[in-house]
Image (cartoon, helix red, strand yellow):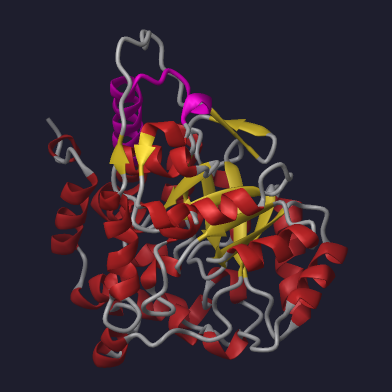
């Protein structure tokens, strides 16, 4: 039995990672906005949803295959973007991308990565790779990133829309987060892999690049420079979801940014139903992240209407514990838990999962 074999759930990986990461690195990955209300709400929301299993159903076969952006994938789980992953493990973003490729999962690469996007694409050539970025003050910088992603074979562009500024993060302010010493020299020499043309040297310095004036007209501009599908990450209300539809957006990620941007916002799962219902019948797909740590959480998200559930920190914990193999183990655990939840609920295919299999607080569907 290997060390990874002893880790049987996402919580095990989190606990192990806490003992492996340097203090400042752990603080960075765990930091939240304000007093952490948004972070806790995202997790607690899944406990407020109860499963409603059906019995005497034929579940001798169980399929977790899904379709996302008109392409099949091995499971309805994706990995959300997370910056500076070499802080967690030397394999960094390459390890995460390869794990997602092996599992048939969507992988969203953060622009603030420690590996160039071209290297990630080359390392996982058959992967469902998407690139996350912002619409920066320097539109030419944004355009260059998009064009590089196109050339490298990325299949979608994810625009973070909930971060015109960086949120108030007390833990970061207390710890004055900087990159761990063993990476400091590398960053000073090469800077962040996708920002060699700028003076940026750490993810905490992303703020000067951000543009507070970004609006829907900039989404229109983005659509003029790329034919790739565009996904907006960070929508928490039906009104903005409707505007996304009016702007012919291909998908949205219902997200509270891991609880790292604005404190006391609703849990993504809590507002998922109203957003799904607003976009019902349209071609705009709805995904969700935040608070997911078990396969039953994934089941609940799919039941309410998400096409895909994405994980952030759980993938980081997996990477910390074992690089690519650690992330693969986390995805395998979630797959097995999802399959088990499906069979115990009387469901044999992901496409059959719907709201009849869950009980939610009544005000979630008002």
- Looking at this view, is 60 or 19 the one in front? 60
**Residue 84 in view (yes/no):** no
- Looking at this view, is 262 or 51 the one in front? 51
**Quadrant of the image containing the N terminus:** top left
**Residue 234 in view (yes/no):** yes
Q: Count the numbered circles shown.
A: 0
Question: Residue 322 appears at what percent x and percent y?
Answer: 27, 47
Question: Residue 314 appears at what percent x and percent y?
Answer: 32, 53
Judge whether 289 appears above or below 51 on screen.
below
Residue 253 sits in which quadrant?
A: bottom right
Residue that appears at 66% across and 45% down: 280
Residue that appears at 36% across and 11% down: 57
Q: Is the magenta stretch mostly helix, strand or loop?
A: helix
Q: Does the magenta stretch include residue 238?
A: no
Question: Residue 134 appears at what percent x and percent y?
Answer: 63, 73
Q: Does the magenta stretch include residue 346?
A: yes
Judge whether 39 appears above or below 153 on screen.
below
Residue that appears at 64% across and 54% down: 278
Residue that appears at 53% across and 66% down: 236
Judge whether 255 appears above or below 102 on screen.
below
Residue 72 sits in which quadrant?
A: top right
**Residue sitting at the far right:** 224
Question: Residue 218 appears at what percent x and percent y?
Answer: 78, 76
- Looking at this view, is 8 or 148 the one in front? 8
- Relative to 56, 365 lies left or right: right
Residues drawn in magenta: 330-353
């Amino acid at each position: 039995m290997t060390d990874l074999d002893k880790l049987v759930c996402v919580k095990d990986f989190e606990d192990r990672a806490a003992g492996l990461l340097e203090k400042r690195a752990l603080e960075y990955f765990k930091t939240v906005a304000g007093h952490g209300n948004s972070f806790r709400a995202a997790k607690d929301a899944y406990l407020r949803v109860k499963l409603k299993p059906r019995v005497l159903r034929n579940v001798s076969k169980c399929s977790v295959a899904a379709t996302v952006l008109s392409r099949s994938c091995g499971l309805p789980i994706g990995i959300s973007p997370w910056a500076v992953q070499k802080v967690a493990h030397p394999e960094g973003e390459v390890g995460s991308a390869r794990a997602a490729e092996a599992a048939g999962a969507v992988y969203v690469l953060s622009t603030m990565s420690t590996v160039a996007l071209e290297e990630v694409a080359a390392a996982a050539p058959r992967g469902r790779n998407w690139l996350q970025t912002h619409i920066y003050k320097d539109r030419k910088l944004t355009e260059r990133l998009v064009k590089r992603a196109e050339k490298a074979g990325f299949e979608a562009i994810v625009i973070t829309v909930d971060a015109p500024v960086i949120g108030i993060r007390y833990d970061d302010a207390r710890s004055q987060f900087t990159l761990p010493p063993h990476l400091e020299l590398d960053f000073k020499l090469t800077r962040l892999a996708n920002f060699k043309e700028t003076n940026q040297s750490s993810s905490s310095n992303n703020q000067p690049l951000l543009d507070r004036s970004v609006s829907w007209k900039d989404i229109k501009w983005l659509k003029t420079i790329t034919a790739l599908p565009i996904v907006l990450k960070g929508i928490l209300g039906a009104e903005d979801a409707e505007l996304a539809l009016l702007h012919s957006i291909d998908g949205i990620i219902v997200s509270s940014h891991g609880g790292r941007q604005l404190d006391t916002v609703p849990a993504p799962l809590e507002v998922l139903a109203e957003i799904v219902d607003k976009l019902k019948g349209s071609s705009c797909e709805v995904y969700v992240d935040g608070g997911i740590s078990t396969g039953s959480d994934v089941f609940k998200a799919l039941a309410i209407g998400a096409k895909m559930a994405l994980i952030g920190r759980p993938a980081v914990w997996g990477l910390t514990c074992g690089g690519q193999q650690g992330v693969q183990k986390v995805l395998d655990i979630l797959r097995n838990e999802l399959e088990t939840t499906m069979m115990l609920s009387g469901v044999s295919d992901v496409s059959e999962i719907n709201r009849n299999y869950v009980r939610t607080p009544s005000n979630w569907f008002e």
